[in-house]
């Protein structure tokens, strides 16, 4: 198979899955959301200051489509100029002419472009109170299912990415409460795991319910049930790739109750997540279900640009479905990581030097 894609779990199933979608049609869907949990100091590097955190997800979706942001006069990046992973996603999708569609699942700020609106409210700070009502979790799944029916009917493979600052903390809480042991990844090299695990344990004490809907209501965020809903109906019709790291593990764990067609589901992320010594994604996925896990080697460590090399050093690592989008481009047109890197560098220089 493709030299830049490793199959880390379910190798035979994974090879069959890749073969079935090679040179086929892909649709990329970005689900944007928000959780007040991201305002806890030290949780995330998304956004330059706490004030811009609510703009991170809508800005990612605008950047993906326009190459610049409309809702805020900046390109989403870390305080010292490391680019949003949306840059990697944008390059990959454009290289292979893969269309994208945006779903708003509780973003605090609305993006200035056409999108699917769920009407969900942003998630609350789980360190203080429950994330959302159980009714909202049910509604998120229901609306996700309606969206998934549409998306699944028009493509050979649906790739679902997410953008939600602070989302690895809510993912950790949901996974812990559902009895999945392990630790989530981070947008920082020094993963604030102790802080995340403390939040997860405290939230778990607030509600002892093992009902998955109540678990997500207590410690999750609106993205998790929305994507689980999309997954359930889309996978009944077509192949679905959950594009992301440990946040998609939380979607998969909750998805066990909302249902999906196992043979049509895989998870894809960057090698920077699967190589992360502080996180245990491979182990977590194997606890949840027998689905393939693809690790995409992007070779950003070879970049001439410091901001891109930093991905290989443990910053950002993944987001906006970068790993899954890159895998889709590789499979659709056979492009290799080094060519994607050259295109990414070109876009980086054009964008960041014109600002």
Image: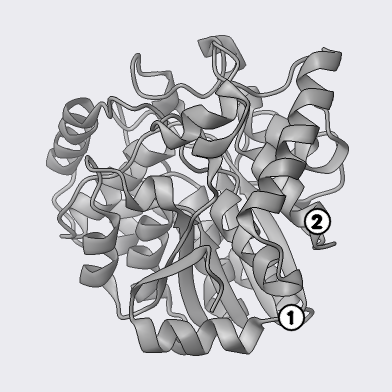
Query: Which label's residue is closer to the chain start, 2 or 1?
Result: 1
Q: CA distance from mark 2 to mark 1?
A: 14 Å
Percent position of residue 346, x then y: 79, 34
Above or below, 61 relative to 224: above
The residue at which mark 2 appears reads as 95
Name the mark on residue 177.
Answer: none
Percent position of residue 174, x then y: 29, 51
Examine the rendering and report whether any part of residue 141 can be seen.
Answer: no
Count the marks.
2
Above or below, 31 relative to 212: above
The residue lying toward the viewer, choosing from 252 and 24, is 24
Residue at 60% over, 45% down: 320
Q: Please state, as top left, top right, bottom left or bottom right, where the C terminus lies in the image.
A: top right
Examine the rendering and report whether any part of residue 13 can be seen.
Answer: yes
The residue lying toward the viewer, choosing from 4 and 78, is 4
Q: Quadrant for residue 54, please give it.
A: top right
The residue lying toward the viewer, choosing from 226 and 69, is 69
What secondary structure is marked by label 2? helix
The residue at which mark 1 appears reads as 23
Residue at 54% over, 11% down: 79
């Amino acid at each position: 198979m493709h030299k830049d894609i490793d199959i880390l779990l379910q190798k035979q199933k994974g090879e069959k899955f890749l073969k079935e979608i090679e040179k086929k049609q892909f649709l990329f869907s970005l689900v944007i959301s928000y959780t007040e949990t991201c305002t806890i100091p030290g949780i995330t590097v998304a956004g330059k200051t706490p004030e811009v955190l609510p703009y991170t997800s809508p800005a990612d979706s605008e950047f993906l489509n326009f190459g610049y942001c409309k809702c805020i006069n900046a390109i989403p990046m870390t305080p010292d100029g490391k680019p949003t992973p949306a840059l990697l996603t944008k390059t990959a999708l454009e290289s292979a002419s893969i269309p994208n569609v945006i779903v708003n699942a509780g973003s605090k700020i609305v993006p200035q472009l056409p999108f699917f609106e769920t009407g969900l409210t942003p998630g609350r700070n789980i360190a203080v109170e429950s994330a959302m009502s159980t009714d909202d979790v049910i509604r998120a799944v229901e609306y996700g299912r309606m969206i998934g029916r549409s998306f699944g009917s028009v493509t050979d493979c649906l790739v679902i990415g997410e953008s939600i600052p602070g989302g690895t903390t809510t993912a950790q809480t949901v996974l812990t409460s559902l009895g999945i042991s392990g630790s989530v990844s981070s947008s920082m090299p020094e993963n604030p795991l102790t802080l995340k695990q403390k939040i997860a344990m405290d939230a778990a004490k607030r509600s002892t319910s093992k009902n998955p809907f109540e678990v997500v209501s207590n410690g999750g965020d609106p993205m998790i049930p929305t994507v689980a809903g999309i997954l359930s109906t889309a996978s009944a019709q077509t192949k679905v790739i959950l594009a992301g790291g440990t946040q998609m593990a939380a979607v998969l764990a909750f998805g066990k109750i909302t249902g999906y067609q196992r043979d049509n589901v895989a998870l894809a992320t960057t090698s920077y997540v699967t190589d992360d010594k502080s996180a245990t994604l491979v182990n977590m996925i194997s606890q949840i279900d027998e689905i393939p896990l693809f690790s995409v080697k992007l070779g950003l460590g070879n970049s001439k640009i410091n901001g891109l090399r930093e991905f290989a050093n443990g910053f950002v690592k993944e987001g906006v479905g970068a790993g899954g989008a890159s895998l889709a481009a590789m499979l659709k047109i056979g492009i290799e990581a080094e060519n994607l890197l050259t295109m990414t560098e070109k876009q980086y220089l054009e964008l960041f030097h014109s600002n």
